[in-house]
Image (cartoon, helix red, strand yellow):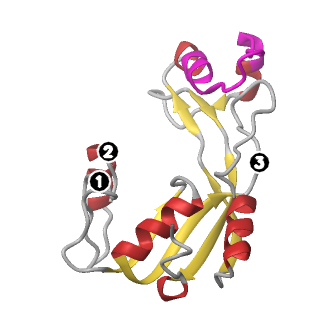
Amino acid sequence: MDADELAIKTLEAHLIKGVTARCGDMETLAPEKPYDAMVFCLFGRTQDTLRIAKKQCRGRIFLVKRDYSHHRFSAGKVSLGEYTAGSTENVLREKGIPYTVERFTAEFGQPFRSLEAAERFFALYNRSESEVLSKDEIRARLTAGPSAEFPYYLPHKKALCLFTIETAAISKEEAV
């Protein structure tokens, strides 16, 4: 499930048999019967995913979380706070919820049609209010793009963690 229709259309083009994509707000669009599994990819706080999963899933949940602590496109150090693997591990340990975790990296780079588009991207995603990257600093981060249409590329490998949790291990009290 995703709230973005384009994301759902893209997913549907690559779905495996037996998987259904739904567009909407997962907190208000509950399934007719509990899901067999749910994947929360870079989604919200751990506490929120536990609450939603307990209500909507009868099987296993998979949480993909960032395995780094600070925002990557800011000029300064801006904390990601509760949206990290470390925070997730702390919550699960505090609640006594068993889990497995697998660490990996994935390429999440961004292609650009122009240098101006790259500058807009950095202006939009810079979370540091006190510092701004200069045009030269932005250009220094870019490499050759994948095509003539996208001649610039911002490589970006994300360190991620995949947490696997059995929904039955989440008590109603822990999901609050």
Camera-nearest label, 2 or 3: 3
Which residue position holds label 1? 8
Res. 2 in view: yes
The one of 148 and 32 positioned closer to us in this rendering? 32
**Spot occupied by residue 9 in the image (x, y as percentages of width and height):** 26, 52
Q: Are marks 1 and 3 in contact (CB under 8 Å)?
A: no
**135 in magenta:** yes
The secondary structure type at the circle numbered 3 is loop
What residue lies at 71% left-to-right and 18% top-to-bottom?
A: 129
Distance, label 1 to label 3, CA atoms, is: 29 Å
Distance, label 2 to label 3, CA atoms, is: 26 Å
Q: Quadrant of residue 126?
A: top right
**Spot occupied by residue 121 in the image (x, y as percentages of width and height):** 56, 23
Amino acid type at mark 3: Ser
Q: Of the residues under marks 1 and 3, which one precedes in the sequence?
A: 1
Please give the range of residues in magenta: 119-137
Q: Quadrant of residue 101?
A: bottom right
Amino acid type at mark 2: Asp
What residue lies at 77% left-to-right and 18% top-to-bottom?
A: 137
Distance, label 2 to label 1, CA atoms, is: 7 Å
Q: Image height check: is 20 above or below 18? A: above
Which residue position holds label 2? 4
What residue lies at 75% left-to-right and 33% top-to-bottom?
A: 78
Q: Are marks 2 and 1 in contact (CB under 8 Å)?
A: yes
The one of 122 and 38 positioned closer to us in this rendering? 38
The secondary structure type at the circle numbered 2 is loop
**Spot occupied by residue 85 in the image (x, y as percentages of width and height):** 70, 61
Q: Is residue 111 left or right of residue 94?
A: left
For disc 1, the neighbor class at 10 Å (few under 14, some 14 to 19, many from 20) is some
Q: Residue furthest right?
A: 77
**122 in magenta:** yes
Which residue position holds label 3? 69
